[in-house]
Image (spheres, coloured by chain):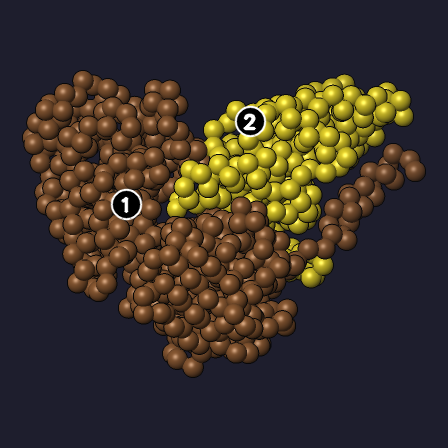
Amino acid sequence: MDRRTFLKSATGAGMAAATGGLAMPALAQSPSKTLRFVPQANLANFDPIWGTQYVVRNAAALVWDTLYGIDSKFQPQRQMVEAEEVSSDGLNWTFKLRSGLKFHDGTPVTSKDVVASLVRWSARDPMGLMLRAIQVELAPVDELTWKWSLKQPFPKMLLALAKNNAPCSFVMPERIAKTDPFTQITEYIGSGPMKFLQKEWVPGAKAVFEKFADYKPRSEKADWLAGGKNILVDRVEWVIMPDPATAAAALQNGEVDWWETPLADLVPVLKGHKDINVDIGDPLGNVGAFRMNHLFPPFNNVKVRQAVLTAMNQEDYMRAVVGDDDKLWKPLPGFFTPGTPLYTEEGGEILKKRNVAEAKKLLAEAGYKGEPVVCVVAQDMAATKSMGDVTAELLKSIGMNVDFVATDWGTVGSRRAQKTPPGQGGWSMFHTWHAGADCINPAAYTAIRANGDKAWFGWPDVPAVETEVTNWFNAKDLAEEKAAMGRLNKAAVENVVFAPTGFYLGYQAWRKNVTGVVSGPLPFFWDVKKD
Amino acid sequence: MLAFVVRRIVTTIPVMAFVALFVFSLLYIAPGDPAAIIAGDQASPADVERIRASLGLDRPYLVRFAEWSFRVIQGDLGTSIFTNLPVTQLIAQRIEPTLSLMVLTLIFAVVIAVPMGVVAAWKAGSWVDKAAMGFAVLGFSVPVFVVGYLLAYLFALKLDWLPVQGYTPISQGFWPWLRNLILPTVTLGLVYVALIARITRATMLDVLQQDYVRTAQAKGVAQKDVLFLHSLKNAAVPIVTIIGIGIALLIGGAVVTESVFAIPGLGRLTVDAILRRDYPVIQGVVLMFSLVYVLVNLLIDLTYTLVDPRIRY
């Protein structure tokens, strides 16, 4: 071949070699009964026990069923369980599975599968760990029955098995559930209403779920994670879109059907579109927060923490996070999710009115000497960046010396675990948020705990808070629970376990040819229909 | 020639070894902890530690580097910390969209930019030249994501001619494949068009002053032949060089373009991996891009012999 012939043929051959013969899963096909959904984040892994990200929990709720499911009134309802019985002393629980339940590989769901799943779950879940600590025995009795014996009563047993906070107690086949809880599973077989099509999974791009024909839904009407999970489409495709503007355009163009978390800035455009519905996504919203390091100056002094809280105006934070839409935020003079049965504002007066003069006075009383406040702020998360900017101004306004560290969430994740002094790789404060679903009571609310070294980052040590957490767990009725929660909120505010910056909500958006979308702490695909 | 190729391939080995060492070391000292991301916000520090241990991230630097290097030599780039899938599988899943985008962009850019540069040089100083160079400045100046959004707004949302996002494999048909790639190609290609057009114009301006061009014109050779056969061929070496150098530009631009148009390519894989600190994926992708870049440079060197027979190795 001479030089000229080579030049003539090179382009065509290169193109053919480049694109010809490389097979990969379809990424833009659209069968008629396919619901295309843009989730809040990438489904980067799919083990809901190993990794506790909410996006994993949301996808897992399609594939794995739970023994109980929480409903919209926050009550645990039977899901896979047909009946349960507890001994009069509260120490022995016996559960029975519904008959005829099958895994996606066709094998029946048995009590052995349940026990193995509970063992794995309880090694990672805060409530599961509490159960483990008082466990005598967890064992199958027969094919469908198992028994859980305890050393002391655990009144929140059904809540533990029903809660939607990650990790949920999903039931897996025994062979999968026997995987070490700190090692990722490699087989995604559940007994939930949809099968996970592992071969079509392209992490970072797409995850596909197919209706499970042998699923046996309950007869009750679906209500969040409870009731009959009837799937009315053939496939659900999760299309990962890192760019919100692209997701908005794709929804307007009908290329996707449902977007879980539209950016607040883009909502007016979506609301103005004739084919799109917009409504609140998760009614339990989020609790904005920044945490102060209780181990080192200046925040090891409660008066300094109180000074910061006194100078705070939650509206500043919420406007920075959600903009001018008043439907999307509420002040939060406490730590628990507004609108839920145990919500309380007891002791929250300090958060209701900004008082800079009082804050400066408290700071002076604390003997603050200008120690730098290492404020670590993730810039790649809109909420943390907005809140971080407000906090920096707040601290300066009361005369604090701010060392603002702009970084990414990955770095915050590792730096916040450092217990070294702020000037030696540690930190003084970082910003985050908590899902409102986690903040309805202390059960899954790790951030409210104040048990020192075992507490969440910042390591608050407030025995009064821990006492009330225990009182809530042991409460026998709603009145006792409410009383414990009130005292807990008061102690947490007084000691500033962390600083709540307000309560905020987000929207979800979907095409009008899609019906059955409800507001909830996670996207529920049952009863969703596409015309 | 064969000896040159062999020599170049052999010299690739220390380059790749250095890249491997550099990337591994950089990630080792970079802040961030994948175990903390995996564990989630509810996890206790003990949980995070246990996950870190299960991933082998608590072992000394040299041990980890030696193990990784040994595997890489055997062609095993490791397993993603997050997806638990082999890095080679993740790359294989993503290579077609990126390759398609880059090849189409190259074709688009060369087909537009080279004639534009030639005509601009031929009509130097005229409005045609000014318009072409104005376009080139615009192509350089406007960020890729802005071009992407504008094109998507016009051609997808307003005119409804093309899809906003996604990728269809070529195995599902040429037109569906091309349809998804038109907007990303134009978006990514504009900066490349600008680069090649400017270099082509500058080189052609120089060549058009040469005696042999004047001779050809004096002999009455048709203007298009003077431009494209006599002049362009002699201006080809710098143009080919800039096309090769531009591959790096394309790789960088593909990251943004793939995000804007939700194309599941290597660029997005890289960004996702960096944000999550998925070390094996970052290392694998960077190593692969480095290899591609080294090989492209080799290919460019060999191409010189095709466009200029005087060059021999």
Nearest the viewer among B266 and B32 is B32
Chain identity of mark 1? A
User: Which corner quadrant of the image does residue B114 belong to?
Assistant: top right
Chain identity of mark 2? B
| Horizontal relation, residue B10 to residue B78: left or right | right
Q: Position of residue A39 (x, y in %)?
A: 46, 56
Say what secondary structure mark 1 lies in.
helix
Q: Amino acid at mark 2?
A: Tyr
Vertical relation: A347 (above or below) A257: above
Dot 1 alpha-carbon crowd within 10 angstroms: few under 14, some 14 to 19, many 20 or more:
many
Q: Amino acid at mark 1?
A: Ile
Residue at left offset 18%, top offset 48%: A489
- Labelled disc at residue A448: 1
- Labelled disc at residue A241: none
Q: Identify the hue of chain B.
A: yellow
Residue at the bottom extreme? A219
Residue at left offset 87%, top offset 40%: A5
Say what secondary structure mark 2 lies in.
helix
User: Which corner quadrant of the image does residue B254 belong to?
Assistant: top right
Q: Position of residue B192 (x, y in %)?
A: 60, 36
Q: Position of residue A301 (x, y in %)?
A: 19, 28
Q: Quadrant of the N terminus of chain A?
A: top right
The residue under label 2 is B28
| Horizontal relation, residue A213 to residue B154: left or right | right
Q: Is residue B297 visible?
A: yes
| Horizontal relation, residue B302 to residue A102: left or right | right
User: Which corner quadrant of the image does residue B132 belong to?
Assistant: top right
Residue at left offset 59%, top offset 73%: A108
| Horizontal relation, residue B97 to residue B134: left or right | right
| Chain letter for the brown colouring in the rendering | A
